[in-house]
Image: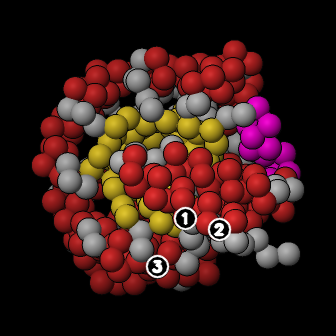
C-alpha cells in the first residue's frame, strides 16, 4: 500500500543533516577537503550509529566540506527539491552556527548562502522557509550568549532559537539567560529535550527556557503528570521516528511512542531531523510509521494539521494551509 503524500510543515530538520554522501564528496572536491571515507559507499557504511553522540561525531566531521556561501546554497537547494517531492509546504529549518564559526567559517557565509536558496523558495519550490538558529548545548553557554546579538541582523530569515547537540548531562537550565534574552528580542524559542535525556529536561525546557515547542520529547511519556500537562496545554512535540530508531532511542519503529502520544491527545508532529543520515525525508518517515504503527488516514491528516498548527506561521497562513488539507480530506 502506498501512503498518499499530504501537505505538511516540517518543524524539525537540521540543514547540516541533509548532507547526502554524494554532495559531501562533491563539496569536498570543490573545497579541497579530504574525507576519511574513500568513496560514497564507504561513507554510507559509516552511517550506522549506537546513540546520539556517535552520530554527532560524524555529523560535525562532515561539516568540514561546507566552506563557502555557495556550499550552503547547494545544500539548501538539494533539501528543497527533496522536501517539495514529499509534500513539505513550509519548513522551519535548524542551523548550527557554532558548528561553522568554530571551524573559521564566517556567519555571513552561512546565512548568505542559506538565504540564496531559502528566500524565494516559495516561488521556486512551493515551500516557505524560516530559520531557527540552535545553540550547541555541549559548549559553554557564554558562547551562545555571545552569538545571540550576531543573529539579529538576519531576523528576516531567523525567527527563533533552539538548543541541540549532545543532551545527557547538559540540562536546559544552563541556557536560561540566553533564552531570556532571545525572548526579550521577540524570537521564538524551541529546544531538543527528552530525546535521550529524562522527562525533567522537558519540564526545564518549558519552565526555565519558556520554549513554545519541544523537539523530540519522546521520553515525556515516562512521566504521567508531564504527559497530562503537554496534553492540557497542547504543547507541540516535533517527533522524528526514523531518527529515534537510527540513534537507538527507540528499539524499533513498531515500539515508537508516537502511537501512545496520539492516543494520549498530544500535539505530535512527524519530522525528519537529519534525513541524509537516518534513511528518509518527511514522507518517508510518515510512510514508515504508518506501516509500523498502523496509522489511519485520519491520524495522518491529524499529524499534518498539527504540523501547521504548531508552526510559527502567521495565523492567516496557518488557516490557508489547513484549508488546503481539508480539501484533501474531502477529496
Ligand atoms: N543535531 C543534529 N541532529 C540532532 C539530534 N537529533 N539531536 C540533537 N542534536 C542534533
Ligand atoms: Zn534534531
- Whether residue 218 sits left or right of residue 60 in the image: it is right
In the displayed structure image, the side of residue 329 where residue 170 appears, left or right: left
Residue 120, by quadrant, is bottom left
Q: Nearer the viewer, mark 3 or mark 1?
A: 1
Q: Which residue is drawn at the image coordinates 34% and 37% (left, top)?
A: 188
Residue 42 figure quarter: bottom right
The residues bearing labels 3 and 2 have C-alpha atoms spaced at a distance of: 22 Å
Q: Can you see residue 57?
A: no
Query: Of discs 3 and 2, which sits in the foreground?
Result: 2
Q: Nearer the viewer, residue 76 or 21?
A: 76
The earlier-in-sequence mark between 3 and 1 is 3
Disc 2: CA contacts within 10 A as few (<14), some (14-19) or many (>=20):
few
Rendered location of residue 301, percent (x, y): 69, 56
Query: The magenta stretch spans which residues?
Result: 251-264
From the viewer's side, name the closer residue of 25 and 274. Answer: 274
**Mark 3, residue position:** 81
User: Which residue is pictured at 55% across the width and 20% down the height?
Assistant: 203
Picture coordinates of residue 259 (x, y %)?
80, 44
Secondary-structure class at tag 3: helix
Residue 142 spot, x, y in % from top left: 25, 28
Residue receiving disc 2 = 328
Q: Are marks 3 and 1 in contact (CB under 8 Å)?
A: no
State the separation of the CA atoms marked 2 and 1.
7 Å
Please name whichever residue, 22 or 272, is drawn nearer the observer in this view of the structure: 272
Amino acid at each position: 500500500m502506498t501512503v498518499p503524500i499530504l501537505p505538511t510543515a516540517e518543524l524539525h530538520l537540521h540543514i547540516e543533516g541533509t548532507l547526502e554522501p554524494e554532495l559531501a564528496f562533491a563539496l569536498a572536491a570543490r573545497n579541497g577537503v579530504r574525507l576519511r571515507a574513500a568513496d560514497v559507499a564507504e561513507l554510507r557504511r559509516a552511517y550506522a550509529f549506537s546513540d546520539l553522540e556517535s552520530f554527532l561525531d560524524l555529523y560535525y566531521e562532515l561539516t568540514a566540506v561546507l566552506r563557502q556561501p555557495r556550499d550552503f546554497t547547494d545544500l539548501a537547494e538539494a533539501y528543497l527539491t527533496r522536501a517539495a517531492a514529499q509534500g513539505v509546504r513550509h519548513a522551519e529549518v535548524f542551523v548550527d552556527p557554532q558548528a561553522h564559526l568554530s571551524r573559521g567559517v564566517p556567519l555571513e557565509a552561512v546565512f548568505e548562502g542559506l538565504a540564496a536558496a531559502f528566500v524565494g523558495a516559495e516561488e521556486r519550490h512551493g515551500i516557505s522557509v524560516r530559520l531557527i538558529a540552535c545553540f550547541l548545548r555541549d559548549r559553554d553557554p557564554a558562547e551562545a550568549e555571545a552569538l545571540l546579538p550576531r543573529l539579529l541582523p538576519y531576523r528576516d530569515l531567523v525567527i527563533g532559537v533552539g538548543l541541540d547537540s549532545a543532551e545527557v548531562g547538559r540540562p536546559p537550565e544552563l541556557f536560561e539567560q540566553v533564552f531570556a534574552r532571545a525572548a526579550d528580542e521577540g524570537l521564538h524559542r524551541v529546544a531538543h529535550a527528552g530525546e535521550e535525556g529524562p522527562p525533567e529536561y522537558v519540564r526545564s525546557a518549558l519552565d526555565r527556557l519558556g520554549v513554545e515547542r519541544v523537539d523530540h520529547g519522546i521520553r515525556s511519556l515516562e512521566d504521567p503528570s508531564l504527559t497530562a500537562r503537554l496534553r492540557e496545554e497542547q504543547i507541540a512535540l516535533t517527533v522524528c521516528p526514523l531518527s529515534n530508531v537510527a540513534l537507538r532511542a527507540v528499539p524499533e519503529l513498531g515500539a515508537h511512542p508516537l502511537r501512545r502520544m496520539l492516543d494520549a491527545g498530544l500535539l505530535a508532529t512527524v519530522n525528519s531531523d537529519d534525513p541524509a543520515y537516518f534513511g528518509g525525508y518527511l514522507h518517508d518517515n510518515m510512510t514508515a510509521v504508518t506501516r509500523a504503527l498502523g496509522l489511519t488516514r485520519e491520524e495522518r491528516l491529524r499529524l499534518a494539521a498539527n504540523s501547521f498548527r504548531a508552526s510559527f506561521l502567521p495565523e492567516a497562513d496557518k488557516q490557508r494551509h489547513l484549508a488546503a488539507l481539508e480539501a484533501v480530506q474531502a477529496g
